[in-house]
Amino acid sequence: MQPDKEPERLLCPITQVMFKDPVFTEAGNTYERDALLELWRRRDDFFDPLFNRVLTSGTVRPNWDKRREIQDFLAEFRTYVPEGWESREVAAPAAEEKGSEERSLWHLLALLLCPRRQWMRVTVMAIGSFAGGVGSLIVEFTCLSEGMQGTWPCSQLEVVLKKFSPWLVAPLSVIVGGLLFGAFFGALAAVGLVLYICLLWLLQ
């Protein structure tokens, strides 16, 4: 006896194949375990595909109700092999999936330092460009004042200016200013990020 159609409620939203090892996330949606973990690995993030929402952890748990539905379906159609299955055998579930899928302190740091969202990358690049531009202007105007010409880095720029063309010194002053200004605010941002990560880690 063959079914007219596989029940849609027994199909994984990711693979559109009947569940073999159904698990649910903290959002409450059920997926095939291997398909969900592979999706997370490719995206390098824990998110719920149906809700398209980032999850706080990668913990998944077996959906026992769904497994019973699948077993009842197979019991009703004793010779039927679901599409995409190699056999009628149902995988034994793990109690819980944790370990490497949990957000660690280093994982949070990687997410913050290497954002995947395009608008975040654009924001970081814009802030970096702004810091470089402002820093170069600070160095330029500071070194133009008579009282600062003998201090570092103005003294070094003055030495370089006497040896090389101003066309070479101008880009150098921009680079030096950007590095100094960016390093100062980068240090402040790094301290803020560490405090933020520690706070998230403690609240988990």
Image (cartoon, rainbow, N blue to C red):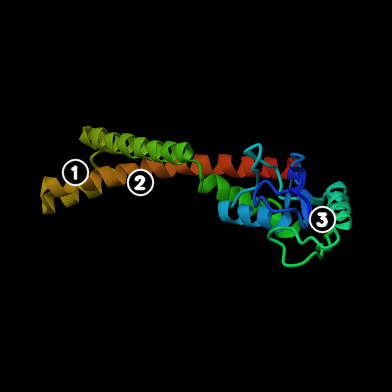
What is the three-letter code of the residue carrying label 2?
A: Leu
Q: Which mark is residue 170?
A: 1
Q: Which residue is mark 2?
A: 179
Neighbor class of circle 1 (other Cα within 10 Å; few <14, some 14-19, many 20+) is some
Vertically, is 150 above or below 101? Answer: above
Q: Residue at x 10, y 49 (%)?
A: 165
Whole-angstrom CA distance, mark 1 to mark 3, is 60 Å
- In front: 148, or 127? 127
- In front: 43, or 108? 43
Whole-angstrom CA distance, mark 2 to mark 1, is 14 Å
Q: Residue at x 57, y 39 (%)?
A: 192
Neighbor class of circle 3 (other Cα within 10 Å; few <14, some 14-19, many 20+) is few
Query: Picture coordinates of residue 106 (x, y %)?
Result: 62, 54
Q: Which residue is mark 3?
A: 96
Q: Is residue 172 left or right of residue 10?
A: left
Query: Picture coordinates of residue 4 (x, y %)?
Result: 75, 49
Whole-angstrom CA distance, mark 3 to mark 2, is 48 Å
